[in-house]
Image (cartoon, rainbow, N blue to C red):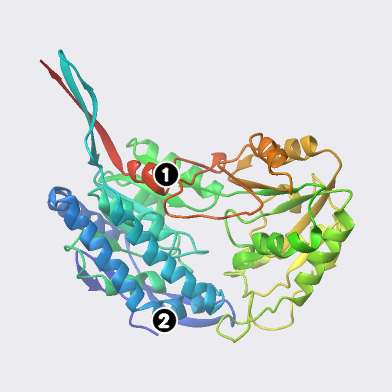
Amino acid sequence: MSDFKLLIGGKLVAGDQTMDVINPATEEVLAKCPRASKAQLNEAVAAAKAAFPAWAATPIAERKKALGAIADIIEANAAELARLLTQEQGKPIGDATGEVYGTAAFFRYFTMLDLPVKVIDDSENRRVEAHRKPLGVIGAIVPWNFPLILMAFKVPPALLAGNTLVVKPAPTTPLATLKLGELIKDALPAGVINFITDANDLGGELTAHPDVRKISFTGSTATGAKVMAGAAATLKRITLELGGNDAGIVLDDVDPKTAAPQLFQSAFQNNGQVCIAMKRLYVHESIYDEMCDELAKIADAAIVGNGLEQGTQLGPLQNKMQFEKVKELLDDAKKTGKVIAGGTVPDQAGYFIKPTIVRDITDGARLVDEEQFGPVLPVIKYSDPEDAVARANASPYGLGGSIWATDLDRAYKLAEKMESGSVWVNKHAELAPNIPFGGSKMSGIGTELGEEGLAEFTQLKIINIAR
């Protein structure tokens, strides 16, 4: 594979340099990928800036039509995009196919929204209107765990609002994104959307660029802090969707056999590489042993392998750096808890770790306090539900959380006390394009998705008329 190109100003161009993209299931080079230079980044921003006035003036009905056309293109090329996604990201082909169709659905959702003028006051003395205007050039920085659908958290609302974009995928997962750029090249006027790549060296340049008016970033909290600092000099608007250490709390009226499969899926989907995956599980002491046993059975039965192989349920970790980090946390967990499933690294090529359940571990252990972002789940015993909520809230993160119970009133009262942007009851990590999503504390700033997420790509403008 070597036919990937950047999209700058409506033209497919080679990078000034190239870089290798590794298949995490084999550790072999999957493709030579273009790598943009700083000069090419500047060209992309200039192209987006030049395209902005005409795109902002395009009627919203036409902008919606373009989003619908992109959704159609994604669906028509789903098989190719999904295979690329599996090869570069590692996830099973069924999951990759779901991500591709989900990406199309997110584009299509935003065709149903509008930005109407809101009349705040229409009285004898004045008329006051609230208008939503586009900001200008948006920098969209996308991580490696869900390269396409997280891009679709940003691109459709930005385009609908009348902005233009420079999109930068993660260095380890650029291929499906670049292929999408090639496919939609003619679906939008030249320069409205641009795709560049880097080797983790252009993020700061994009964030600080004087002609970029907003950065929408999904990634780690540490990098999010750098984005925030980089945006400060030009007072850019920012939306940051950052790390999480989501807690699930299982109450004493739950049947472990019934709940365990859902809990396992909540923690291990995409191999645990989900910002809102359940990353620590608090289980009441009365059902603790049975719940641990049920989770261990599911983990032991899970099929781990190359995402292109039939029957694979969990693929590899996406990259070597994350692989080494999870191994380090796993080694520490063996000292601070008891591994009852998994805990091994297969002797084979690829960044594989068997799904692991750790019991008899508690707050203060690294696996509990840190975001593992991998297939290792600590299960923590508690006695008092109020104490479990307090322990869940003690984290500096606050992205998501969940309460699991038969008594929904009891669960709701505890959910109200959880300090996180989203709280689920008897489920975890459910997202939809019409449901606003964002974090509290060190898990982020701002909101994505829904009408609230669309508004974040606009400038509120008040027109106040005397009568």
Tell which of 249 and 50 is nearer to you. 249
How crowded is the residue under tag 2: few (<14 C-alpha within 10 Å), some, or many (20+)?
some
How crowded is the residue under tag 1: few (<14 C-alpha within 10 Å), some, or many (20+)?
many
Name the residue located 48 percent from the left edge and 71 percent from the top edge: 98
Which quarter of the image is occupied by the N terminus?
Answer: bottom left
The percent position of residue 19, horizontal first and vertical second, equals 42, 74
Tell which of 147 and 262 is nearer to you. 262
Q: Amino acid at mark 1?
A: Thr
Which quarter of the image is occupied by the C terminus?
Answer: top left
Gap in angstroms between the C-alphas marked 1 and 2: 31 Å
Identify the element where label 2 is drawn.
Answer: helix
The answer to whether residue 434 of the structure is visible from this angle is: yes
The answer to whether residue 16 of the structure is visible from this angle is: no
* Quarter of image, res 440: top right
Residue under circle 2?
Answer: 79
On screen, 196 above or below 281?
Answer: below
On screen, 446 above or below 313?
Answer: above
Whether label 1 touches label 2, CB < 8 Å: no
Name the outermost residue toward the left: 467
On screen, 105 above or below 286?
Answer: below
Name the outermost residue toward the top: 125
Name the residue located 78 percent from the left edge and 53 percent from the top edge: 254
Name the residue located 44 percent from the left edge and 78 percent from the top edge: 84
Q: Amino acid at mark 2?
A: Ala
Disc 1 versus disc 2: nearer the observer: 2
The percent position of residue 106, horizontal first and vertical second, equals 38, 60
* Quarter of image, res 305: bottom right
The percent position of residue 97, horizontal first and vertical second, equals 47, 75
* Sooner in the amino-acid sequence: mark 1 or mark 2: 2
Q: Tell whether 15 sits left or right of 149.
A: left
Identify the element where label 1 is drawn.
Answer: strand
Residue under circle 1?
Answer: 239
